[in-house]
Image (spheres, rainbow, N blue to C red):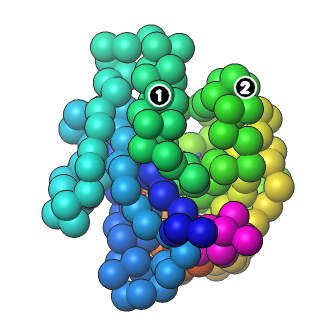
Amino acid sequence: MDKIGIAVLCSGGGTNLQAILGAAEAGLLPDGEIVLVVADSPSAYALTRAARYGIETAVFDRALLARGEREQRIAELLTERKIGLVVLAGFMTVLSAAFVKRFEGRIINVHPALIPSFCGVGMYGLHVHEAVLARGVKVTGATVHYVTEECDGGPIIAQKAVEVKAGDTPETLQKRVMREAEWVILPESVEAVCKKLRG
Ligand code: GAR
């Protein structure tokens, strides 16, 4: 079977996208190929990162398109490009049940905490790290999981713990969680899922 065609959906900086691109460049993604990067904002820096690698990009602007319309157009493009795996890498829109059903078992997400802690509706980006610091936990981390219609509720693929340090701010903690956990387990999980899908 051909390599699994991967689409990465992003909203912002795209450092997780960069981690997957770097893994692919280093030969660590033998079972998949990143063929499309989708953003829901034209200013997402992830688009610049993708363009540098000559990867097709598409923008479905959340400021201009309602969620239903946006999802419909994204789904059509994913189908047209024969995408086998959808990776949510800092994609800040919760997908509808209908979208998730259409790509069942083929959507994964990276979350910047150890699910089931600090997850669910409203828990995204820096808010997660703010909540971690407010609660005073000493260990946090990241999770990669399959996406189901329950927000952050799908089966877990990989997790990695990260120490919370005295004096951390949400920003310093976010950076450590990305560097030590997200950028490690996301590319590994992408390859593991592609390998499994390839059979
Ligand atoms: C990452 O920390 C990712 O885990 C988080 O947003 C950041 C995106 O950074 N995603 C969520 O909070 C989703 N619930 P990036 O654009 O640099 O990859």
Residue that appears at 46% across and 14% down: 69
Query: Closest to the observer: 154 or 100?
Result: 100
Q: Which residue does the numbered mark 2 point to in the structure image?
A: 97
Residue that appears at 74% across and 49% down: 105
Q: Which residues are magenta?
A: 190-199
Say if the magenta span includes residue 89.
Answer: no
Amino acid residing under circle 1? Glu
Bin the neighbour count of mark 1 within 10 Å (Cα to Cα): few under 14, some 14-19, many 20 and up: few
Quadrant of image for the C terminus: bottom right
Tally the numbered discs: 2
Query: Closest to the observer: 48 or 83?
Result: 83
Residue that appears at 26% across and 49% down: 56
Q: Considering only order in the chain, which callout, 1 or 2, is on the residue closer to the N terminus? A: 1
* Badge 1 residue CB within 8 Å of ligand 1: no
Q: Which residue does the numbered mark 1 point to in the structure image?
A: 76
The image position of residue 46, as x and y in percent, is 29, 52
Query: To which quarter of the image does residue 66 belong?
Result: top left
Amino acid residing under circle 2? Ala
The Cα–Cα distance between marks 2 and 1, rounded to whole angstroms, is 16 Å
Bin the neighbour count of mark 2 within 10 Å (Cα to Cα): few under 14, some 14-19, many 20 and up: few
Comparing labels 2 and 1, the label whose residue is closer to the camera: 1
